[in-house]
Amino acid sequence: MEEMKQVLHAIQDEYPDDFAWCYGCGRLNTEGDHFRTGWDGNRTVTFYKPEEKYTSIPGFVYGGAIASLVDCHGTGSCSLALHRKNGFEPGDGETPPRFVTASLHVDYLKPTPQEALLKAVGTVEEIHPKKWKVTVEVYADDTLCATGEVIGAVMPAIFGQQ
């Protein structure tokens, strides 16, 4: 099995504590997946090794786990892109914008093997100052297993009010 890769400067590490609880990518959610999204050149990347609890049938990953990876990778990618547009990078000490999912679409191309290290790769496009589109490819080792598209919207202010 390939050595576990990880993103060094993830946008999720910069989210304020009040917004770091997402099951997929929230660093403060002890039960969550802790997806971490960063730059790889002009594309975004997230590495993920699904736990056995995400089995659909023995040897293969449950599709919902793949959808969660696409979803969180997409919103994290939107945050990275707008943060960069604003002149910042993860680790600069500036709070990045937080995005929520406006639309999620996933196509499953091949069964995803349970033991593989997954790599989500995103291509980001601004479609509106408050909406960004991310095209995502999910690889198991070198095999393209799923593709997706996420439309992320800048998190509404009401999310910060309780």
Image (cartoon, grey):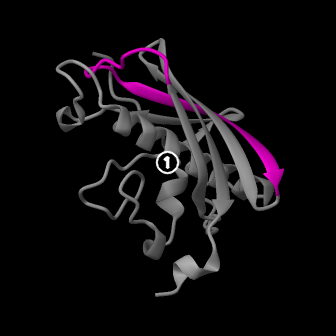
Q: Quadrant of the N terminus?
A: top left
Local SS, label 1: helix
Viewer-proximal residue, 62 or 96? 62
Mark 1 is on which residue type? Cys
Rendered image quadrant of residue 57: top left
| Image mark count | 1
Rendered image quadrant of residue 137: top right
Q: Residue 129 at x, y = what percent?
A: 82, 60
Residue 109 left/right relative to 43: left
Outermost right residue: 128
Q: Residue 103 at x, y = what percent?
A: 61, 49
Residue 2 seen in this snapshot? yes
- Identify the residue shown where x is 22% and y is 30%: 55
Q: Residue 102 at x, y = what percent?
A: 62, 55
Residue named by callout 1: 72
Outermost bottom residue: 162
Residue 88 left/right relative to 14: right
Rendered image quadrant of residue 95: bottom right
Q: Residue 160 at x, y = what percent?
A: 53, 81
Q: Is residue 75 above or below residue 99?
A: above
Indicate yes or no whether the magenta region holds residue 54.
no
Viewer-proximal residue, 20 or 134? 134
- Identify the residue shown where x is 63% and y is 79%: 157
Q: Is residue 130 above or below residue 16?
A: above
Indicate yes or no whether the magenta region holds residue 126.
yes
- Identify the residue shown where x is 57% and y is 50%: 76
Magenta part of the chain: 108-128
Residue 37 seen in this snapshot? no
